[in-house]
Image: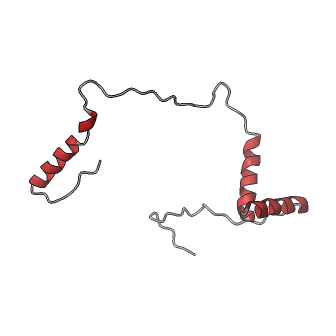
Amino acid sequence: MEHLDITLLKHHDVNMRTTLTLDEDLAKRLKEIARQGGRSFKEVTNEVIRRGLTAGAPQVEGVGAFRVEPKACGFKPGVDPHKLNQIYDDLEIEKLGSGTGFGVHEP
C-alpha cells in the first residue's frame, strides 16, 4: 500500500473498489457501449451512473445559463499599445543594474 503524503498528486480516496452485481441486460449494454466507443467498461459504467444520478436532480429556478458577452473596449486614453512591454523592459534593466543577479521578471 502506498504511503499517504500531502505532497502526492493522487488523493487517497479518488479510486474506490466495490463489487456491484448488474442485471445481465445492463452489463451487456454497458459492454457494448464500451466496445463501440473504444473505452473501458469502468469508464462507461461511471459515466452512466453519473448521468443517472444527475438526471433527476432538481433544477434551480430562475437561474439561466451564464453567458459572457464580449465587448471591445480598447485602451484608456494615454495608453500606447505599442509600448506595453516597455515597463517590463525597464524593470528588467533595473534588476540587472541592482547587483542582485541576472533574472527575468515573471509577468
Q: Nearer the viewer, residue 94 or 79?
A: 79
Q: Farthest bottom residue? A: 1
Q: Is residue 42 above or below residue 97?
A: below
User: How far across and down, in percent of the image, does residue 25 sit?
Assistant: 90, 59
Q: Give the quadrant of residue 7.
A: bottom left
Q: Nearer the viewer, residue 106 or 58?
A: 106
Horizontally, is 66 left or right of 16 in the view?
Answer: left
Q: Give the quadrant of residue 77.
A: top left
What colouring does the structure picture have? Answer: secondary structure
User: How far across and down, in percent of the image, does residue 107 sit?
Assistant: 29, 47
Q: Is residue 46 visible?
A: yes
Q: Farthest front residue? A: 82
User: How far across and down, in percent of the image, does residue 12 sit?
Assistant: 56, 64
Q: Is residue 22 visible?
A: no
Q: Give the quadrant of residue 43.
A: bottom right
Residue at 14% x, 50% y is 93
Horizontally, is 14 left or right of 17 in the view?
Answer: left
User: How far across and down, in percent of the image, does residue 79 sit?
Assistant: 25, 30
